[in-house]
Image (cartoon, rainbow, N blue to C red):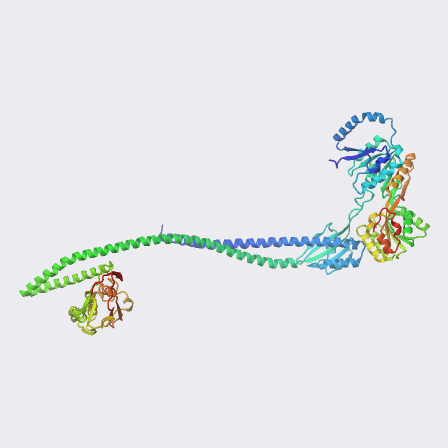
Amino acid sequence: MMPGGSGHLRFQSTSLRGMLPYARVGGIAVVSLAAFLIMSWLMYREFRQLLIEQGVQLAEQFAHTSRPVFVVNNLDAIQKTASVFQGYPGVQYVAVIDRDFRVRYEDGVPSVPTHEAYRGSWPEHGTLAAEDDHFWHFIAPIGITDAEANSPYVERTRPGEVVGYVLLDIDKDRLRRLGFVLVPINATIGVVVTFLLIFWAKKETLSAHADVLESEVRIRTQDALAARDAALTADRHKSEFLATVTHEMRTPLHAIIGYTQLALENLQYHDDRPNETKFKVVLKNAVQLLALINNILDTTALEAGKMDVSLEPANLKDLVHSAIDTVRPLVSKNGNQLEHQINGQEMIVVDKAKLQQILTNLLTNAAKFTHRGHILLKAESTETQLCIEISDTGIGIPHDQQALIFQPFRKVEIDNAHKYQGTGLGLAISQAFCGLMGGAITVKSSVNAGATFTVTIPLPVRLKGDRHIDGARVSERAV
Amino acid sequence: MDNSCLTVREGTSERPGNLSSGVPEDRKRLSQGPYYGATCIVLILACLSAPLLARGASLPSPNVCVLYPDVGEPYARITAEILNGIAERISASQPCTLALLEQADTHAAKGWLSGRSPKVVITLGRLATHVLETSGTRLPYVIGALDISPDTRPEASGISLAVDPAVMFDHLTKIAPRIKRVFLVFEPAHDRWLLERAIKEASARGLELRAEPAANVLEGAERYGHFVQIAEPHTDAIWLTLNNAIIDDQNLVPYLIEKAWYRKIIIVSNTLEHARWGVLFATYPDNRALGHRLAEMALQLAEHPEHPLGVDPLRDIKIAPNTRIMNHLGLPAGSTSHFEIRYD
């Protein structure tokens, strides 16, 4: 199958699946509204039938009540009777006529010319004779019966006889009002019920989705936990591997460096300048390799929480001078000027090796990324804090990368990065060492405006028993 | 199938006193329906009564048989009283009786009569008269307990339930002595004979009779409605005859009574129920005396069956006064204690 066709089918399937809830909601709405409209129609029809039956009963009652007064032709009584029935809701016209269709009494205006319309088809019982848009026209006969019809002593039984009719026009206002009320009410109920059904359907769907999601989350969580465990295991294996390898590499490297130095002394003794230069290169690279291995070892130890802190008295001035001496060749090589200022008490109690490595790393970075610039180291120790600030006028660090440079193997991403060699471990190790002593390194920099790294270590460095600080294990040592 | 077949009650009264309870003691009940059933019953009766028939052949045939309707109360009591009256007058000739249900079979009735060969038959009420007249028998008969008229039955013999105007006027003037004028509505085709008697009797008693014709209840209502408007209190009386063709009991009479109450007009009637409703008094037949008269007429007709006796008005009546109306009209009610029926 062609990729395009497959995609089209997938699109169609997705659309249909997406439209399914809407179709269901629409179906519910249509069915509910249709049901309530049908119910409205049925109720309307029933009420109409009820009103017609009431009208027929009213006409028959009127005829029954009119019978005595009709028989004796008492117009006052007929009027009195008719007025009672005219008081019923919706009655607009009442009339009493005799069997020759002469009007004995009438009140109101007939909506249709009843006498002409129904002549010849007069009913034997009360009935709805006709209707139009506004009125029902009821007719009921006025009948008299023979009270003695059942007597065995009467020769002639008089059959039931219709002596007249009553006419009753009732308007359809009540039916119309019901229609006006019934349809909106039922439609409203229909809408409410529709919404309830939709809400119920949605709730069911959401509940089903929630169940699916919950199981998926549970599965994913289990997967993530397994992945995390695997990653931790792999990381531990990596650290152990690195520690083992670098440790095993450092031993022969020391031998290389040692024998290279011996060879170099012999060459210097014999003044063999060409070979001396070559061996110096070997020595330099071996030393760099050793530094790299040491950094990797430190990183591995830090990640494994096996880095110890050894507090001992140290002379701040000596530490600074030692670090400056270490980086001086690089400073000179890049044509930089390095100054330093030391204030406060000189003797402090810190992890001497780590502090010196911190200073060396920061000065190395400053010298590496500054060309023909100025580097200033300011160190100040008080009773409570040691603060060392190293600033340069180098290429600076972009603002968005300042948080990344303290992560292992992360280097500043700049255009000519290949010019600046390094493993990317220095700042990460320095930050970790500061952390082991309860301090931190911060940076302020902007591109082409240099950088200022500030090391802050609270004094005295407090160690109580064995505890972990920032993931590293610290052992207290007598000072 | 009781309703579809003839059901008769027959009996032969040996002692008139047996009818005092209203039902003869020796009356039998016959069910004659489909031919099969009738045949069976006839055979069974023939077997059972063979000795009796052999002996009965020497007995005289009854002179009078009575056909009457088998109806419930209150008519059954009336019929029983009439039968008692008949039996009291013809006890020597052992009258036989046959009770007829509504769905009576005229052929069965004819057979029953042929088996007894009476000289004359008395029919009581509409059903019995109709059954006899349609049965095809040529027996002479006397009609009783029916509002017959000689205007419609010129060859009949019997006593109508229509009250004789002479008796009516006598009672009226006795209870209301100040009466001077009597209003009456009559049906020309039916009540002419009564009107002639009324005119004659009223004149004989110094009363003015004002009678107007009506052909139906509406006209009757119109005439009576007019009468009740123009009648004078105390001296005028309105007479409601026993003609249901022109008098609508349910609608007219209550209206007349209401109007008469307010105008203090006297109304008298030949329908007993009207007395309860509020007329001054109503008449009702003296059934036992009526029975006597019917029996006498039957025996007379038996002697000369070729000469019909004609229709006589009812003279044997009783009075049921309404004392509340009497008091309302200022008439003395103290002398009404002897009336069998009195409404207070």
- Residue B119 placement: quadrant: top right
Can residue A4 be seen in the rendering of this structure? no
Q: Nearer the viewer, residue B91 or A126?
A: B91
Question: Relative to A443, does residue A166 appear above or below in the rendering?
Answer: above
> Can residue A262 be spotted in the picture?
yes
Q: Quadrant of residue B40?
A: top right
Residue A166 percent location from the top left of the image? 74, 55
Pick whichever, B315 or B330, lies toward us. B330
Q: Quadrant of the C terminus of chain A?
A: bottom left
Residue at figure coordinates x 13%, y 60% from the top left:
A254
Residue B175 placement (x, y as % from top left): 90, 51
- Residue B153's quadrant in the figure? top right
**Whole-percent x and y of residue A89?**
68, 59
Considering only vertical position in the picture, is A53 above or below B90?
below
**Residue B241 percent coordinates (x, y):** 86, 49
Q: Is residue B220 left or right of A6 when viewed as pictured?
A: right
For the residue pair A57 and A357, the one nearer the viewer reads as A357
Q: Is residue A429 left or right of residue B257?
A: left
Q: Is residue A186 left or right of residue A150?
A: left
How many numbered badges does the structure rendering display?
A: 0
In this view, A82 is above or below A337:
above
